[in-house]
Image (cartoon, helix red, strand yellow):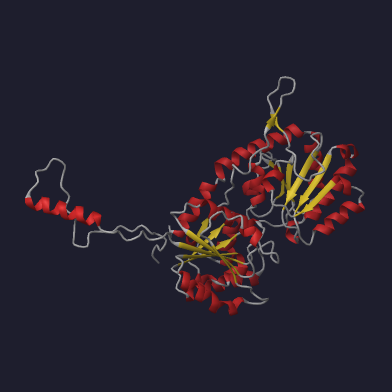
Amino acid sequence: MGKPFDSGAARGNPGGTADVLAPGAAATPGATLQAVRAAQADLRPRAPAAPPPLVCHIVYRFDTGGLENGLVNLINHMPRATARHMVVALTEVAEGFAARVRRRDVEFVSLHKPPGHGLRLYPPLVKLLRRCRPAVVHTRNLAALEMQPAAAWAGVPLRVHGEHGRDAEDIDGTSRRHQWMRRAYAPFVHRYVALSRDLAGYLTERVGIDGRRVAQVYNGVDTLRFRPAQPVGSDAGHAAVARREPVAGSPFNDPGLWVAGTVGRMMTVKAQPDLAQAFVRALRQAPALRARLRLVMVGEGSLREQARHILHEAGVAELAWLPGERHDVPELMRGFDAFVLPSHAEGISNTILEAMASGLPVLATSVGGNPELVSGGSTGVLVPAGDIDALAATLIQWCQRPDAARALGQVGRERVCVRFSLKSMIDGYTAVYRGA
């Protein structure tokens, strides 16, 4: 396999090696004639430069989510001279979410896939790929992996597949059926991208992919958009410290409160009801915290009503805010004192990176790639998945000792800026697309 992503191949002189007149050399008649011809050649119309190579990103649905946020960051921040992009959604492209892509040259295509295998999408997808002639097709997660044979049929030079997180039906990666499916499509894939060491190990150890075909690339976070709240004032001669910033619509903008927040799709694997139960338990174990401790759970999904019911039954519904889906996540983060992710499975969590970039301490479950992001005792706390007592204990501790929690967030911000920059992510994907 060559390197189809390289677009700047050197162009030699069709007639042989060009003659160059050295500085200070005497001009002979032959040399003068060559110089005139060179000058005339410079005046001829030049062929337009070849456009950058096209990368076709194939996803199941292009809508709010961590995988999709990572793709938006990749498109928005990869230099225009490096690549052009198009996004193909097997089901739908959500127009509101697609508006987050700032480049106006990106084509979005919805294939309106019905339930079942995507075999019937092969002919229209092959036709699309032959029309657009991408240098790279990049599928993401198992749902889009089945499009790799169509990309091979269309003759796409480089075919890449990314693993971004665990399957909802296989959160521990032990399903032999899912492993078999990935092996079945492996002959059509040239390179793999795993977002965490955990996922890279899954591909090489359980699926059986040759490690030389697997690159591990962490998500990057925009540390300009996601930044700590602005420092305010000084108390008794101490240096100014960051405080929460007001959030539009929030009932908890009082600076005397301490707010724990989470952001994400409310789906089974994200386990937001665990956080609701931990919040209830924290208030029962430390009743004095009712005056200060508050919970914000942002997102839509099937678990939203379940979480709301838990809070209502415990009589603490007025101490929590569940606003549904929001599009002002950077501002929301600056309105939290801490970020909590109670997931039962993760790849590399964009929201953890965004929270760390926002200077927040992170309380997360020790699953998937979370331990690769959160350094327990240094940038946050890791607890076992489903451990309600451990979640509650940390909420109590941080609410009672907010300065200590804030210090963890400051270290997390420094860690993100050094290890999880957008530049590192862009460089990693560029190397994969170039076949390096």
Residue 116 screen position, x and y as percent: 66, 77
**Which residue occupies 88% across, 56% down?**
309
Label tally: 0
- Farthest residue, direction left: 29
Looking at the picture, tell me which residue is in the foreground, 5 or 276.
5
Hey, which quadrant is residue 7 in on the image?
bottom left
| Camera sees residue 381 | no
Residue 30 screen position, x and y as percent: 8, 53
Task: Specify whether 319 is left or right of 219.
Answer: right
| Camera sees residue 175 | yes
Hey, which quadrant is residue 4 in on the image?
bottom left
Q: Quadrant of the N terminus?
A: bottom left
Residue 356 screen position, x and y as percent: 65, 43
Looking at the picture, tell me which residue is in the foreground, 414 or 26.
26
Task: Specify whether 375 is left or right of 383.
Answer: left
The answer to whether residue 23 is above or below residue 66 is: above
Task: Specify whether 208 is left or right of 327.
Answer: left
**Which residue occupies 78% across, 50% down?**
297
